[in-house]
Amino acid sequence: MMRRTLGRSNIEVSAIGMGCWAIGGPFHSSEGPCGWGEVDDDESVRTIHRALELGVDFFDTADVYGAGHSERVLARALAGRRDQVVIATKWGNRFDEATKFSDGAGDDPAYLREAVTASLRRLGTDYIDLYQLHLGGLELDKAAELLGTLEALVEEGKIRSYGWSTDDPERAAAWGSDGEHCTAIQHDFSLMRGARPEVLEVCERMGLASVNRGPLAMGLLTGKYAADTAVGPDDVRGSAFEWMVLFKDGRPAPEYLARLDAVRDVLTADGRTLAQGALGWLWAVSDATVPIPGCRTVAQVEDNAGALQKGPLTQGQVKEIETLLAA
């Protein structure tokens, strides 16, 4: 079974994690839906249990997912199993649990302490393994003001390590340099979006884990979506967020479907599914990568966890994919 160490920490995890955004269910902001539609909490719990059976022990969520609901479902599923898992969560987005509406940023040290206390309560635990800032574009000076509080939370035993969910290499490097217990950068990284070499280079140079969100390109790399596929009304892929490029008006963007068609045969070589090939590509690109594909059904987690048996693609396959995408 493939294992990886989270950056500069001594925290060991399965080489893939389970992203828990989707199991939070619907929530909204002024720009539209932020979740992935309605969910079945019982199926979510079964999915988490199946992940553990298959060797996946790294679970990544955020307080805002489902306006606290994802953390609560994860707590329910992991009751009595806390010592078997590594839990990562995030903070920085203010939200109302009753209305399931997210509005505004919580980017100061006082809110950080408020948020970690609330997450610990919802997760039913007295410590968080990896606590991540969820404001990817926060100004560097404001982000620097959070480091002292994060270090204090490590000293108090409330968190074991911390990181930043950001796609900006300057921000990643700032915390990698100044944060003693900073151990991971979570960034958007998939075969569809390219290797994001700048952020990855920072992680490799500074000994940080590259935690890969969106490793299956919001579902495109599972092969389930065609040009005429439309997502539901409560699905974030139909929102107006500026960063929503993989889907346009709730349908897959044609240029990304074309990229998938170009590399489909390489990804599915050696008996892999598309998802397993996409995860294998991430492992082959760097030893620092830890993809966290989202799951909300047992079938999805079984497909993703199957990649652990297949392992990384070969370097020859990586070069072939690079050539095909360049063309």
Image (cartoon, rainbow, N blue to C red):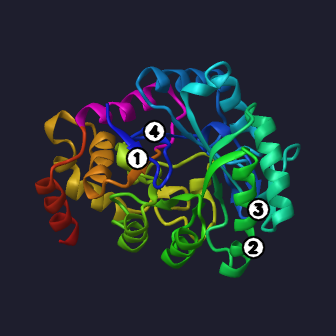
Going by the numbered disc 1, the residue's amino acid type is: Tyr
Marks 1/3 in contact by CB < 8 Å: the verdict is no
Q: Secondary structure at mark 1?
A: loop
Marks 4/2 in contact by CB < 8 Å: the verdict is no
Q: Secondary structure at mark 3?
A: helix
In this view of the protein, can residue 147 be seen by the observer? yes
Q: Quadrant of the C terminus?
A: bottom left
Mark 1 surroundings within 10 Å by alpha-carbon count, few (fewer than 14), some (14 through 19), many (20 or more): some
| Whole-percent x, y for residue 193 in the image | 38, 64
User: Nearer the viewer's eye, disc 4 or disc 1?
Assistant: 4
Indicate whether residue 300 is drawn in magenta: yes
Mark 3 surroundings within 10 Å by alpha-carbon count, few (fewer than 14), some (14 through 19), many (20 or more): some
Q: Name the N-terminal-most of marks 1 and 2.
A: 2
Left/right of residue 152 with respect to residue 215 in the rendered view: right
Going by the numbered disc 2, the residue's amino acid type is: Glu
Would you say the magenta stretch is mainly helix, strand or loop?
A: helix
Q: Which residue is mark 3?
A: 149
Which residue is at a point 67% across and 36% down the rendered structure image? 38
Which residue is at a point 64% across and 24% down the rendered structure image? 77
For the record, the magenta segment spans: 293-310
Indicate whether residue 189 is drawn in magenta: no
Q: CA distance from mark 4 to mark 2?
A: 29 Å
Which residue is at a point 38% across and 53% down the rendered structure image? 289
Q: Which residue is mark 4?
A: 13
Q: Name the N-terminal-most of marks 4 and 2.
A: 4
Q: Which mark is residue 225?
A: 1
